[in-house]
Amino acid sequence: MSRALFIIDVQNDFTEGGALGVDGGAAVAAGITRFLAGHAADYGTIFASRDWHDEGNDNGGHFATDAEPDFVDTWPAHCVAGTPGADYHPDFETAAVTFHIRKGQGKPAYSIFEGVSEEGESVHALLTERGVTHVDVVGIATDYCVRASALDALEHGQHVRVLSDLVAGVAAESSTAALAELGHAGAEIVPSAPDSRD
């Protein structure tokens, strides 16, 4: 058995003060760093994803450039490649990351599986190549990209755990619904501290 960690979109634009900042985002960034300090060795592979959208266009309708965003399918411009908003949050220490995954790049993308590594490899191919069978998921936002990434991991046959204290969502109601959906789909929803798990 090989276990991987997915760290989803811990970026400045998704934390407090960013273009689409969520409450608790900075705390999640710091919490993931603390978790990695004690648990990075538990994982054969650590993936960190980032939205990495193109500058100067609507990214396949993802950016609301000509109308008000609906915050469902269209959003204010965020995580534009090469801007500070696309950078990892400064409290997220990335030294343990094996693969940095960029997603978006001209089109809508929520799941880490829609991105590629800096070498152009797909996440699915990297998981297969490394014999990964179990995936833990942390990051932002619970009700969007964390949800989509965990559902896709299940779809790809992975045993999935979402570490419930290392995620932050856009809204409490939709985040609770997302975690319930993931649990129903077969994911385990557990705290990051092993001694806190049932």
Image (cartoon, rainbow, N blue to C red):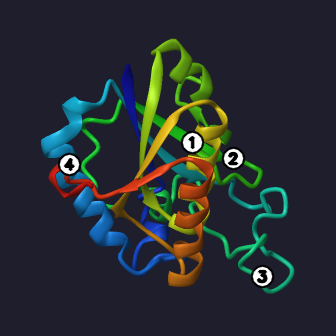
Circles 2 and 3: CB atoms closer than 8 Å? no
Please determine whether, in this image, residue 40 is positioned above or below residue 64: above
Q: Which of these two is toward me, 121 or 155?
A: 155
Circles 2 and 1: CB atoms closer than 8 Å? yes
Secondary structure of the residue carrying numbered label 2 = loop
According to the picture, the residue beneath numbered tag 3 turns out to be: 70
According to the picture, the residue beneath numbered tag 2 turns out to be: 105
Q: Residues within 10 Å of mark 2 (few under 14, many from 20)?
A: some
Secondary structure of the residue carrying numbered label 4 = helix
Secondary structure of the residue carrying numbered label 1 = strand
Q: In the visual, does 10 lie left or right of 111?
A: left
Q: Which of these two is toward me, 169 or 122?
A: 169
Q: Quadrant for the C terminus, please.
A: bottom left
Q: In the visual, does 29 lie left or right of 184?
A: left
- Residue 137: image x %, image y %? 43, 48
Q: Residues within 10 Å of mark 3 (few under 14, many from 20)?
A: few
Residue 80 in view in this figure: no
According to the picture, the residue beneath numbered tag 4 turns out to be: 194
Q: Which kind of residue does numbered mark 1 sit on? A: Arg
